[in-house]
Each structure stands twice: as structure tokens, then as C-alpha cells.
Amino acid sequence: MRNLKQYFFKRKGETEMAKKAISDKSVTILNFLKANVDANILADDIAEGTGLEKAAVNGVVTLGLAKKGYAERIAGTIELPDGTEKAVKFIRVTPEGMAYDHDAALAEDAQAAAGN
């Protein structure tokens, strides 16, 4: 039987370097949010505006952007055509997301990987 610890735990002396750069899909979504900073944006809106699947948008927002503090979900309501209201989560860029510079993050990751 394989030693499962090697798969799930860091070995003694190893350090894990947190990457600063985000994925290409994250950049696409973040740029869309930055361009629509004053709008109430839903995952459907991002999917339509970027050409990404809604499931991918939700995954990237939850596991990437929100986790790093670049976007957040805000509870709200929308009015449906029949006049009823529906609870939704709007997606908004945070101040940290507005300040994110992808080129600078890539350069910082490259410098860290080189050991500088």
C-alpha cells in the first residue's frame, strides 16, 4: 500500500509558495467585472458577456476570485416578468480585484520561482 501521507501532506522542510497570478478564465471574468463595476451582475450575465459556460463562471468566481478576495457575492433580488421577486447573488469586484495587475502578478510568480 502506498504511503498516503506523501500525497496529502507536505514533507518536512517543504514550503508551498502561493501563486499571485490567477488563471486566464479568472482574468476574463475579472476584466468583465471591472468593465461593469456599477452594474448588478449575475453569473448568467458574465457567461453571456464572456462566452464561458455558467458553471465555469460560478466555479471560477467561488474557487478563484472570491477565495483570493478579488470578487464577492452580494445577496439581492430581481423582479421577474410576472412581477414576482427572486432571490439572487450578484457578483461584484472588490477593491482588491480592481487593483489586481495580471502582468505584475505573473512577474512576481516568475521571480519567486527563480528564487529571487
Image (cartoon, rainbow, N blue to C red):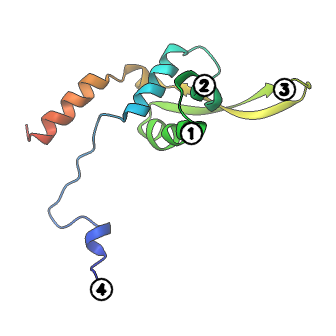
Question: Quarter holding the N terminus?
Answer: bottom left
Q: Nearer the viewer, mark 1 or mark 2?
A: 2
Amino acid type of the residue tagged 3 in the rendering: Leu
Q: Secondary structure at mark 4?
A: loop
Residue 1 tag number: 4
Q: Nearer the viewer, residue 14 or 22?
A: 22
Amino acid type of the residue tagged 1 in the rendering: Asn
* Mark 1 vs 4: CB contact within 8 A: no
In 3D space, how far apart are the residues under numbered discs 1 and 4 (Cα atoms)? 37 Å
Q: Secondary structure at mark 3?
A: loop
Whole-percent x, y for residue 60 in the image = 48, 39
Q: Residue at x 36, y 24 (%)?
A: 100
Q: Is residue 43 left or right of residue 78?
A: left
Q: Secondary structure at mark 1?
A: helix
Q: Is residue 69 above or below residue 34?
A: below
Local packing at callout 2 (Cα closer than 10 Å; few below 14, some 14-19, many 20+) is few
Whole-percent x, y for residue 9 in the image = 29, 67
**Pointer 2: what residue?**
48
Q: Residue at x 54, y 16 (%)?
A: 37
Whole-percent x, y for residue 84 in the image = 89, 29
Q: Is residue 61 above or below residue 78?
A: below
In 3D space, how far apart are the residues under numbered discs 1 and 2 (Cα atoms)? 13 Å
Local packing at callout 1 (Cα closer than 10 Å; few below 14, some 14-19, many 20+) is some
**Pointer 3: what residue?**
80
Whichever of labels 1 and 4 marks the residue nearer the N terminus, that label is 4
Q: Nearer the viewer, mark 2 or mark 4?
A: 2
Whichever of labels 2 and 4 marks the residue nearer the N terminus, that label is 4
In 3D space, how far apart are the residues under numbered discs 3 and 2 (Cα atoms)? 19 Å
Amino acid type of the residue tagged 4 in the rendering: Met
Local packing at callout 3 (Cα closer than 10 Å; few below 14, some 14-19, many 20+) is few
**Pointer 1: what residue?**
58
